[in-house]
Image: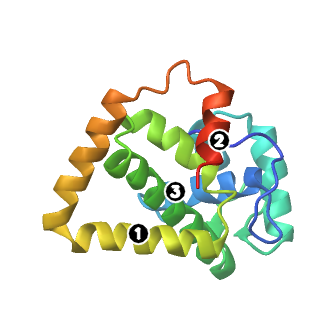
Amino acid sequence: MVRAKKGGVSVNKNTTSNQEDYLEAIHKILQDRPVVRVKEIAAELEVSKPSVTSALQTLSRDGLVNYEPYGLITLTTAGEKKAGMIFQKHKIIEEFFETILGIEEQAAAEQACVMEHGLDNPTFKRLIMFMRYHYEHEGDKDLWLKKFSDFCDKNPIDGLKAEEVQEFLHKE
């Protein structure tokens, strides 16, 4: 799992992107087992055990995880809700990148991890509506996705100059 930049602030109330990464990692591990250990979180996030312990203390104090030193870790009801939302945001954004934008799987996963923390709920809901529209209009999507793919092939952004971006942004 790719992590957002350390200590970054999330649009979501009261949690940093770093804390959200821990919640998401715990949520992911809990898909396979009923409890989590510090070493599993450390391995998932590629961080040290003391870093995990420090994060768990904060998350426990905030009422998002059940944690005692050297004990097993679970999410509280509030933690499950927040972790589930983070996980859903990640999956929707990743799917958008792969399906709509045609971005390679690993890059889509990495970018989704970065964006999930900064996407507010109204924007996320709009993205969900776009994805629903995309899937509900099966017959139409092949044509416009093909046209978009062709457009990208004919207009590569490698070497795109700042002036060209400015020109595009100021078109009416």
Separation of residues labelled 2 and 3 (CA atoms): 12 Å
User: In which quadrant of the rendered image does the N terminus lie?
Assistant: top right
Nearer the observer, 29 or 103:
103
- In the picture of the structure, the residue carrying the numbered disc 3 is 90
Left or right for 8, reference 147:
right
Residue type indicated by callout 3 = His
Left or right for 21, reference 51:
left
Which is in the foreground here, disc 3 or disc 1? 1
Q: Is residue 35 visible?
A: no
Which is in the foreground here, disc 2 or disc 1? 1
Nearer the observer, 66 or 144:
144
Q: Is residue 148 above or below residue 144?
A: above
Q: Residues within 10 Å of mark 2 (few under 14, many from 20)?
A: some
Q: Residues within 10 Å of mark 1 (few under 14, many from 20)?
A: few
Q: From the top left corner, tell me how far across and down residue 8 is, in percent.
A: 81, 48
Q: Residue at x 75, y 50 (%)?
A: 18
Q: From the top left corner, tell me how far across and down residue 5 is, in percent.
A: 75, 40
Q: Residues within 10 Å of mark 3 (few under 14, many from 20)?
A: many
The residue positioned farthest toward the bottom in the image shown? 77
- In the picture of the structure, the residue carrying the numbered disc 1 is 130
Q: Is residue 138 above or below residue 5?
A: below
Left or right for 22, reference 92:
right
Q: How is the image coloured?
A: rainbow
Residue type indicated by callout 1 = Phe
Nearer the observer, 105 or 53:
105
- In the picture of the structure, the residue carrying the numbered disc 2 is 3
Separation of residues labelled 2 and 1 (CA atoms): 26 Å
Labels 3 and 1: the sequence-earlier one: 3
